[in-house]
Image (tube, rainbow, N blue to C red):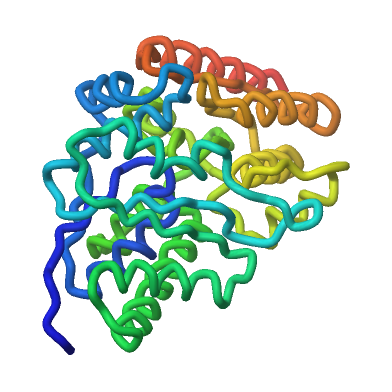
Amino acid sequence: MEDFALYKVGIPRSLAYYFYLPLWKTFITELGHEVVESPPTSRDILDRGVKEAVNDACIPIKLYHGHAAYLAQRCDMLFCPRLVSVRKHGDFGTETFCPKFLGLPDMVRLALNPLPPLIDVRIDLKEPRSGLWDAACEVGRQLGHDQAEIKRALRLAQAAQRDFRSLCQQGVLVPDALEAVLNGKKDCTKPAFSHDLTIAVVGYPYVIYDPYINAGLLKILQQEGVNIVTQDMLSDRVLNRESKGLPKDLFWYFSNRVVYGGMHFMKKPGINGMIHVTAFACGPDSMVDRLLEIQVKRHSKIPYLAIAVDEHTGEAGVRTRVEAFLDMLRYQRRGR
């Protein structure tokens, strides 16, 4: 191996962090560099993001700016990929990410100063074999590596990502699966006790798994003794099967996953209710919420609760709504 500079590469704890962290963190660390993650979301990080981002940005984009600002002077390079597509799907293969994802590196460059160099690799996996390899080569070259080193690191990174997805599909929540794969947490299986309710929680992963912005929703449900299932516990094959029940797919990757997951849980026996956590001011999410509401009324009888979150959302309000929702479900069960 040739001599190369060792870099601290920052990865903001937001957006694709909750879905692709095992892939990119493993890839970068296997190349010999240090990955610096921003800490869990706090009021200070959120306030900084609100200050730096454009006014009409949704809360996840504001959060990303806050996490990026935290890392700006704590790393040598900031990993900020331009996510275009991760599969050829939808009408004419047009599925993509929302416009804010596509323009994220440009938004961060214009908003933050000082800012380290960005690793703003374009990721378009409509051609999966060449797309990921091309993206990995671009990241590896920016970090000073040759193809042999990149190939080895990518192989290990893909294995870590598969392990992560496998744990999720075994019913492990994303935060616990990340901890298991990346930090060697031994026991991340669900506790072996019975639950009186099973609730499907659907929404974008960077909303439902961020304990600050979701106002502690998952913790509240766990404290109430509820079994939680999410769309990220379903395989791509199961999710994509649901697309046949729609006249048209949405354009956005994460939006389709939420809709397909919601439609699956509507029909699955044993699901007592569904909660959709939606980001206020997110254009695609407004359509997702309305579509799920229509599908529940047409094809299911399970109760449905939508919770919109933004920078002003507090735990007390969310707890009150969730506890009332669970009380209603338990009352219904007792009345049968």
- Figure quadrant of residue 200: top right
47 sits to left or right of 283: left
- The residue drawn where x is 54% and y is 16% is 327
Q: Is 146 placed left or right of 250 in the picture?
A: left
Horizontal relation, residue 242 to residue 151: left or right: right
Tell me the quarter of the picture where residue 146 sits: bottom left
Q: Front-most of 177 and 287?
A: 287
The spot of residue 100 in percent (x, y) is 50, 36
Classify residue 328 as left or right of residue 157: right
- Where residue 113 appears, as percent x and y from the top left, is 21, 34
Q: In this view, does 233 lie above or below 55?
A: below
Q: Residue at x 46, y 51 (%)?
A: 82
Q: Can residue 177 be seen in this view?
A: no
In this view, 320 is above or below 53: above
Which quadrant: the C terminus? top right
Residue 60: x, y in percent? 42, 31
- Compared with 319, 92 (above or below) is below
Front-most of residues 139 and 213: 139
Number of numbered discs visible in the structure rendering: 0
Q: In which quarter of the image is the N terminus?
A: bottom left
**Closest to the observer: 143 or 24?**
143
Residue farthest to the front, as pictured: 110
**Residue 14 visible in image:** yes
State the residue at coordinates (59%, 21%): 306
Q: Which residue is drawn at 57% across and 59% down?
A: 86
Whether residue 57 is situated above or below residue 30 in the rendered picture: above
Percent of width and height locating residue 142: 28, 67
